[in-house]
Every structure is written in structure tokens, then in C-alpha cells.
Image (spheres, grey):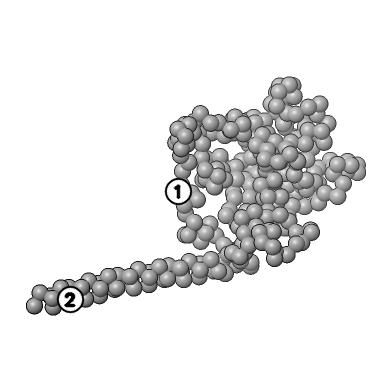
Amino acid sequence: MAKHTVLLALILLAVVFGAREVDRRTRHDGWQQDYLRQVYSPLHFQPAIAQATDDQCLACHREVLDDKIRERSPAGLAARDTVAWYQQTSTYQGEQDSFHRRHLATPLAKELMDLKCTFCHQGHDPREEAPGASATSPRQKDAPFTLRKQVDPEATCLKCHGQMPWKNMNLPGPWQGEIKDAFRNDCLTGCHEQIRTVRHQVSYLKADAIEAAGKKSGDACHGCHGGRAWYRVSYPYPRHEWPGMSGPAPAWAEGRPSQSDARHRLAPAGPAAAAARH
């Protein structure tokens, strides 16, 4: 009788644990299948991603805004004691923050920018997250180098994080220091109230807010144009025609476009608005 009881107990345990293992595998396989369906969702590829909204992106990627930086590093260094050089401009306010929050959610981002997820993220290839990742990757000589999730720094980051081209501007030296003091930290008076006055007219910036901030302090201008440089070169901005523009383009500007990228241009708001901008 005792042997039969033990045998029955073992059978029941096998059934219970077997059922749990089947359930675990089912849930795992279901998650894996659902994940793969999301990876290959049309929303991650052209042309659908060009029309994707932030809400659609954040439905799955909400952590990019919810995650916060560590108050202390694993070694114990406090975040407030590790101020980077680009955080020393007056336009960087508040505590250190994460990359995506600085571009989408911080007060400065909301005041001066109108960036969307798809400004940087224009689709991706889940098989190859970076060019040349495998021996069989195609080599395209003229193809842009893109980072993970197919972000092209030249078409995104460099638009705001390039070096200030002070030599092109015929300044005797970089803006910070004596030059800044000589111009009373004012980029507009004497220069950009008359020169290259058609600027910031793109969908990812709030032009009126930027101009207002620039009138208060040149730090608002330099904060992007050199103050937070991530690259050693300046971005070749289009030279939009401005009132009073005359003469041939200088040598350093030869070949530059006269219009912003088509996907970033603002829709015309009527003849009056166009006349005011030009």
C-alpha cells in the first residue's frame, strides 16, 4: 500500500511540474514570437516610420523617457560632481539628465525644440545594427555611416552639435573668452541682425522662441552653435537668401544648398508669412 502511495505521489508531482514547464515554455515562446512581430513591424521601416508619432514609438519605448541617470556611479561618485564641459553654458539648467530626456522632455527642449523620435530614428535593419558588422556586409563607398537604429549623425546630431566656424565668420578667435566679452555676449547686434537673418525655419525647432532667447543672451546661440560641440567640424548649414544679400558666396560656402532638407521644411503659411521670412 505504501509503495502504491509513493508511486502515485511521484506521478502527480511529474504531472504538476510537467504542466508548469509546458506553461513556461509556452509563455516564453509566445513572448519571443510577439517580440519578433514587433521588431519586424512595418512601423520600423520606410515608408511607415516617416509618419510615425511619438506616442506610437513610446508605446513600446517609454523607458527612454522614464529612465533617470544614477545619483551616484557604481564607484560612488555623485552625478552633481561630474559636470561635463557642455553643461557649463547657461542654457544647460537643472540636474544632469538622460540623453533622450534632454532632447524631448527637459524645459529647454520644450522651449526651443520640436524634436520628434523620427527626427533621428528613420528605420532600422534588425539583421545589421551597424555597417560592416559582419564579413558578408555589403561595402558601399558613398553610403553614410549610421549608428545603432540607423541614426545618421551628419543628418541629425551635427546640425546642432558641430564646432562654431569662427574662422569663416572672420573672428580673431573662438567665441568663448575675449571675443565673447568684446561683443558683450551678443550675437545679434552688429552681425546677425543684418547677416543670415533667415534661420531656424525648420520643423524641428521653434524659431520664434530661439530668436527671443538669442536677444536675451548670446549663450542661447552659442549653446548650440559650438557650446556643445560633439564634432570637430561645423555643420554646412544651407545659406537661405536674406534681405540685402549680395555678392557671390565666399569660398567656404561654395556648393552649399540654399534650402533646408525637404523633410524639415515648414509648410507655407501664405504670402504674408513668406514675405516676412524672406
Residue 191: image location, x then y, percent = 77, 32
Residue 91 x/y as whole percent: 59, 33
Would residue 152 appear left or right of 166 to someone viewing this image? left
Residue type beneath disc 2: Leu
Marker disc for residue 66: 1
> Who's the residue at 75% across and 24% down the image?
179
Residue 171 located left or right of residue 130: right
Outermost residue toward the left? 1
User: In x, y percent, where is residue 33?
Assistant: 46, 71
For numbered disc 2, what is the local secondary structure? helix
Q: Residues within 10 Å of mark 1 (few under 14, many from 20)?
A: few
Between 132 and 12, the one lying in front of the other is: 12
- List the single residue furthest toward the right: 248
Q: Quadrant of residue 178?
A: top right
Q: Amino acid at mark 1?
A: Asp
Who's the residue at 53% across and 31% down the image? 82
**203, 152: nearer the viewer:** 152
> Does residue 8 appear left or right of residue 148 in this picture?
left
**Picture disc at residue 22:** none
Q: Is residue 265 above or below residue 126?
A: above
Measured in 3D between alpha carbons, the distance from the residue under mark 2 to the one under mark 1, in whole angstroms, is: 53 Å
Residue annotated with mark 2: 7
Give residue 219's position: percent from left, percent from top.
65, 31
Which residue is found at the position 58% from the left and 33% from the top?
Answer: 84
Counting the numbered discs, the total is 2
Q: Residue at x 65, y 44 (%)?
A: 207
In this image, 233 relative to 80: left or right?
Answer: right
Please tell me how crowded label 2 is: few (under 14), some (14-19), or many (20+) other residues with Cα within 10 Å: few
Q: Secondary structure at mark 1?
A: helix
The quarter of the rendered structure image containing the N terminus is bottom left
